[in-house]
Amino acid sequence: MNSPKVRLITTQDGSSSLYLPSLDETYHSTRGALGESIHVYIENGINTLTNTEIKLLEVGFGTGLNALLTYQFALKKQVNVSYHTLEPFPLAKEIYENLGYARAGDEQEIFEKMHAMTKGNQRLTPFFDFHRYHQSLENFSPDLTFDIIYFDAFAPSKQPDIWAKENLSKCLELLAPGGIMVTYCAQGQFKRDLATIGFQVEVLPGGMGKKEMVRARRPA
Ligand SMILES: C[S@@+](CC[C@H](N)C(=O)[O-])C[C@H]1O[C@@H](n2cnc3c(N)ncnc32)[C@H](O)[C@@H]1O
């Protein structure tokens, strides 16, 4: 399997991320990978749900940072998470083992299992079910719906196709009524497309000094 050719970088909050020269793009905000992921996906995403059984879809597993933060969240809040994540371009071991995201021994083991399994299902702990698809959003057609989607693709200026209206409509269909999609992106055309498709769009303060982020809801 060909892993993307990436370079390890350190972002401004001290957490690591990756730089992908072929797109001239980073996997996270250079202002802080950890800070922005916590702000967008945890605090303004999963933490706003009231269910104790959460079905979650992530578009772009990448470094696994969101998955690890969500695992930590589920453990702390005692909620059950079924984590489904799409990644057509898995990272090589020598990359993910140097990210330094996992803290204790158990966490390291869980993080490595998430990465090593490029497709398949695994109950990682009694409260965290992990489902990984070696697949792109465009080819994904599951027979279930989700309470929350983490839309964490590369920026629209770098990977415009994934932000196409057809994909956003697909995300609306993949959400249960009342379900939410969160993303760091607050580009004007993206917000207009979400509203046209039928999402209720909320613009919130962005993470790590960014002006805005988006939370979009499928009407109940
Ligand atoms: C912004 S980066 C990764 C963010 C990731 N959540 C993290 O914490 O590292 C975007 C990811 O989307 C993946 N990707 C690229 N095209 C995709 C597609 N069509 N469908 C799903 N994921 C895609 C990339 O390989 C990359 O890992």
Image (cartoon, rainbow, N blue to C red):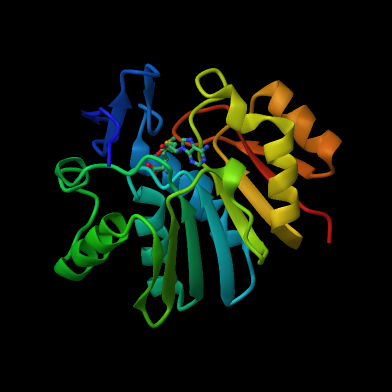
Left or right of 22? Residue 210 is right
Q: Is residue 110 left or right of residue 138?
A: left
- Tell me if I can see residue 79 in this picture: yes
Which residue is pictured at 69% across the width and 56% down the height? 174
Is residue 64 rendered to the left or right of residue 152?
Answer: left
Q: Which of 20 and 214 is in front in this view?
A: 20
**Residue 44: image x %, image y %?**
57, 51
Q: Position of residue 163 (x, y in %)?
A: 63, 31
Does 140 appear above or below 4?
below
Q: State which image quarter holds ligand 1.
A: top left
Query: Residue drawn 72% across and 22% down?
Result: 189
| Residue in the picture at 62% in, 58% down | 148
Look at the picture and state if 33 lies above or below 31.
below
Q: In the visual, does 90 lie left or right of 112?
A: right
Q: Nearer the viewer, residue 76 or 4?
A: 4
Quarter of the image for residue 14 reads top left
Q: Residue furthest front?
A: 1
Q: In the image, is residue 131 above or below residue 133?
A: below
Q: x and y percent of residue 146 in the render?
A: 64, 62
Residue 25 occupies which quadrant of the picture? top left
The C terminus appears in which quarter of the rendering? bottom right
Where the N terminus falls, by quadrant?
top left
Nearest the eye: 212 or 109: 109
- Is residue 12 visible in the rendered image? The answer is no
Above-or-below relation of 101 to 12: below
What residue is shown at x 80% (from left), y 45% (from top)?
200
Q: How many labels does the image show?
A: 0
Q: How far across and how far down the image is residue 87, in percent?
A: 43, 46
